[in-house]
Image (cartoon, grey):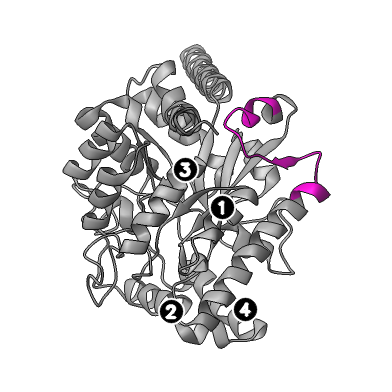
Amino acid sequence: MKKSVYWVLVMGGLLIHTFAKAESYSKKVMKIHNKAITVDTHCDTPMALLQEDFDVAVRNKAPQSRVDFPRMKEGGLDAMFFAAFTGQRERTPENTQAAYEKANRMIEKTYEVCRENSNLAEVATEPDDVLRISAEGKRAIYIGMENGFPIGTDLNRVEEFYKKGVRYITLCHSSNNDICDSSTDKKGAEHNGLSRFGKEVVKEMNRLGMMIDVSHISDKAFYDVIELSSVPVIASHSSVRAIAHHPRNMTDDMIKALAANGGVIQICMLDDYVKDPDTTTIRYQKEQELREIFLSKEWETMNDEEKGKIRAEWRGLDEKYPKELPTVSDFVDHIDYVKNLVGIDFVGIGSDFDGGGGIRDCVDVSEFPRITEEMLARGYTRDEISKVWGGNFFRVFKAIEEITGQ
């Protein structure tokens, strides 16, 4: 009897000690995480802002949305780039104008929700804005534009969008446009890299001090940008092709060229870009079918009810066809790879939340500290963690402003 009591006391003491150590470690993780200036350079949440049933000021649940102001606060995220995304359509004057108007609606809506919730968030335009806004306990919302389709062939629109607060443009999306070739256009190259107009766009963005985002563009277009740009460039949401063999990801040579340019690759959380998918599953086939609809002409002609059904079908995939998603460990493997290839100064984080991003143990912005925990477990120093979470990106952002005099 006495032995039993003794062992109960011993085991109880060990459990208390273990829990205390775990709690202490968790506090250490959050202390390091909260001390860093953290930024996620790509989410597609502005699409959700246009939906009547979505409120960015209240806590929502994934997969309806993976980003809102309360969860940004929970996840210790100081800043985020809200990307005004427009899918690529046939390049007619009517479609270009429709994309232009949609991009403007998303930009205006971003300003609107920040004005309406000025105690929670504020639109930011300068690199140092995040310091003031985060010191006030608010989230800094920067604006990007995913796909240069809304520009059409009107160079004046680049400056127009800059004046509206857009601080980077992803030159293209899943298909070629008037600026450059895409890495995923099924028809192949059209311009053999940057078009003549695309070269003018790059020069204009350099003049304005607007960041050039090379995510989505073809390998040849990437090298054209690197050769032409007078300032560092960013990949707002791309990963490592040597790990996940997708044309959207960057090769070793591309990462080296980006580092030599002084730029930064922001690792993306879209599962197929983190880990090679099993293409034989029904889930994979269903995902591809729905993505085709999202990017098709048909999508633009659907009414709200029809679009709602397609979105609901997408959200229901997890329940109907469960999928083994990559983990935070898989994600940090990409950060490790870049660190070992070119150094710690050229890598950051761009989740692509609300645009397909999300992994098993980091499903939304509230779970971002798990990335910090994984980096700490791998021996990253506090300084290295701070660089990955924002230091590297803001170095590029500031350098562009200094070089261009903006």
Q: Which mark is residue 159?
A: 1
Residue at numbered disc 2: 91
| Mark 2 closeness class: few <14, some 14–19, many ≥20 residues within 10 Å | some
Q: Is 238 drawn above or below residue 313 in the view shown?
A: above
Q: Tag 2: residue type?
A: Arg
Q: Tag 4: residue type?
A: Gly
Pointer 4 and pointer 1: residues touching (CB < 8 Å)? Answer: no
Kindly report which numbered mark, 4 or 1, lies closer to the viewer in this rendering: 1
Pointer 2 and pointer 1: residues touching (CB < 8 Å)? Answer: no
Residue at the image point whose x is 22% and y is 44% from the top: 254
**Whole-number angstrom distance, CA of label 2 to CA of label 1:** 21 Å
Residue at numbered disc 4: 308
Magenta span of residues = 114-132
Indicate the secondary structure of the residue bearing disc 1: helix
Disc nearer the start of the sequence (2/1): 2
Residue at numbered disc 3: 207
Q: Is residue 376 left or right of residue 311?
A: left
